[in-house]
Every structure is written in structure tokens, then in C-alpha cells.
Amino acid sequence: MIKTIKADKISKKDIRDLILLYKEKGWWDKEPSSYLKKMIKGSFIFAAYYEKGKIAGMGRIISDGISDAYIQDLAVFKKYEGKGIGTKILNFLSEKSKKFSFLSLIAQNKTEKFYKKNGFRKAKNAKAMLYDKIRKTEKYGL
């Protein structure tokens, strides 16, 4: 089951699960729960997939709510991979984005096949660019 998470209503258990998921994927080292709450609050949609009451995966949309939307941080715990959970989260987020004229994401190399299978393609005449003066991106494989 997929639920939309709100920063002011998230449980401590869900915060712990989400932090563990970010850490399992190698995206975080020590970010506190307050950081996560700010991310949730700043997202257009932050969704989690629950399996037997526990978070199995998550994803979010970043958008101004009018024209463009970006899927960010789609992830599933390793023990739940291969069960279609990522596809369900992606479909949920894509459905919530139908009002936008533009929906995109940055696929890490190992995930490109997954996104292609689910209706995404490489952008023509475009390439993801990173601004290195803010944060070291090598840590995240970017």
C-alpha cells in the first residue's frame, strides 16, 4: 500500500525506516530526522510503500506545482527488491504528475533499464549537470 507522507504527521518509526533506507542506498551518512522532515515538507509529494506496516520503499516529487516535476529519491530496501514495489511507487508518482507538462528524473547507471521499462527515455539534446561548489558529488556516484 502506498501512502503520502506529511512532515507534521510522520511517526518516529517511519522516520527511522526512511533514514535507514537513505543510508542503505549510500545517500546519507548522518543526516538527522529534522533534515528528513524538511525534505518531506519541501517535496510536492513524498510517498512510501508499506509492506506489513513497515516502509519497504519510497519516492518523492519535487515541483513548483504548476509546470515541471522531477522524481527524486526513488528507492526500495534491498530485501524488497524484485517484487514490483519500485514500479508501483513510480506509477503512483507518475499518475500524480499528469497535470504537469514535464516529468523527469536522473537515473543512476544501474537503474536506467528500470526507468526505460516504465516509460522513461533519455532526453534528446540534454545532459544532467552538477554544480560542484555546493557538495561533493563523487560520494553519491555522480
Image (cartoon, grey):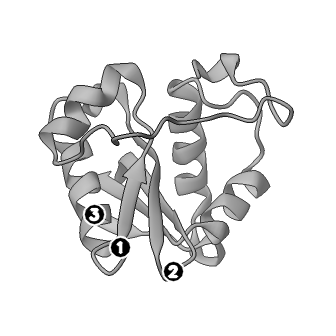
Q: Mark 1: which secondary structure?
A: loop
Outermost residue toward the front in this view: 125
Q: Residues within 10 Å of mark 2 (few under 14, many from 20)?
A: some
Q: Position of residue 41 (x, y in %)?
A: 65, 71
The residue that appears at 37% across and 50% down in the rendered structure is 54
Q: Mark 3: which secondary structure?
A: helix
Q: Residues within 10 Å of mark 3 (few under 14, many from 20)?
A: many
Q: Earlier in the sequence, mark 1 or mark 2?
A: 2
Mark number, residue 94 = 3
Q: Nearer the viewer, residue 124 or 62?
A: 124
Q: Is residue 82 visible?
A: yes
- The three-letter amino acid code for the residue at tag 3 is Ser
Q: Nearer the viewer, residue 20 or 119?
A: 119
Residue under circle 1?
101
Q: Alpha carbon of mark 3 to alpha carbon of mark 1: how far? A: 12 Å
Q: Is residue 93 left or right of residue 127?
A: left
Q: Earlier in the sequence, mark 2 or mark 3?
A: 2
- The three-letter amino acid code for the residue at tag 1 is Ser
Mark number, residue 112 = none
Q: Residues within 10 Å of mark 1 (few under 14, many from 20)?
A: few
Q: Mark 2: which secondary structure?
A: loop
Residue under circle 2?
65
Q: Position of residue 107 (x, y in %)?
A: 40, 34
Q: Is residue 27 above or below residue 31?
A: above
Would you say the residues marked 3 and 1 are in contact, meaning their CB atoms lie under 8 Å apart?
Answer: no
Q: Is residue 73 above or below residue 130?
A: below
Q: Alpha carbon of mark 1 to alpha carbon of mark 2: how far? A: 11 Å
Mark 1 vs mark 2: in front: 1
Q: Quadrant of the C terminus?
A: top right
Q: Position of residue 125 (x, y in %)?
A: 40, 40
Q: Position of residue 140 (x, y in %)?
A: 62, 23
